[in-house]
Amino acid sequence: MSIATPVKHVDKSQVGLTERQYHIGIAPGEVCSVALLPGDPFRVPFVAGFLTDVKEVARNREHRTTAVELQL
């Protein structure tokens, strides 16, 4: 007979807010809080072709991050 150990819940809401995210290769401040998610990394250059002042921020495996300055 084993005794169940209590489950310890961890608050992850603040995890990664101050450090580089290894899977996408970006750190806080390198991109804004608004994002377009094209679904396919090969669509990123296609969408970027319609924008100006495009800068590739990071590229890691299937993740591509591109920043652009928008004036609304």
Image (cartoon, rainbow, N blue to C red):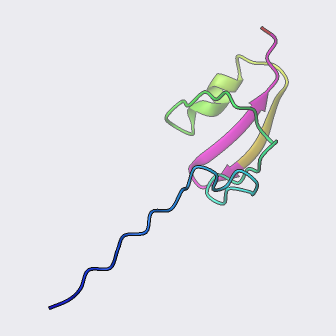
Viewer-side residue, 22 vs 53 = 22
Which residue is the extreme one toward the top?
Answer: 72
Residue 37 picture location, percent across and down: 56, 31
Viewer-side residue, 56 vs 27 = 27
Viewer-side residue, 31 vs 55 = 31
Q: Is residue 24 above or below residue 10?
A: above
Residue 23 picture location, percent across and down: 61, 57
Residue 26 picture location, percent across and down: 73, 50
What residue appears at the point 55 percent right and 55 percent down from the top-left corner?
Answer: 12
Instruction: Examine the image and state in which quarter residue 8 appears.
Output: bottom left
Q: Say whether residue 70 is magenta.
A: yes
Which residue is the extreme one toward the bottom?
Answer: 1
13 horizontally vs 3: left or right = right
Instruction: Examine the image and state in which quarter residue 41 appears.
Output: top right
Q: Is residue 39 above or below residue 58?
A: above
Residue 5 picture location, percent across and down: 32, 79
Q: Main secondary structure of the magenta part?
A: strand
What residue appears at the point 81 percent right and 42 percent down from the top-left corner?
Answer: 30
Q: Is residue 6 above or below residue 58?
A: below
48 horizontally vs 39: left or right = right
Q: Is residue 61 above or below residue 53?
A: below
Q: Say whether residue 35 is magenta.
A: no
What residue appears at the point 73 percent right and 36 percent down from the top-left corner?
Answer: 66
User: Magenta region: which residues?
Assistant: 59-71
What residue appears at the point 76 percent right and 54 percent down from the top-left corner?
Answer: 18
Which quadrant would the N terminus be assigned to in this image?
Answer: bottom left
Which quadrant would the C terminus be assigned to in this image?
Answer: top right
Which residue is the extreme one toward the right?
Answer: 53
State the count of labels.
0
48 horizontally vs 41: left or right = right
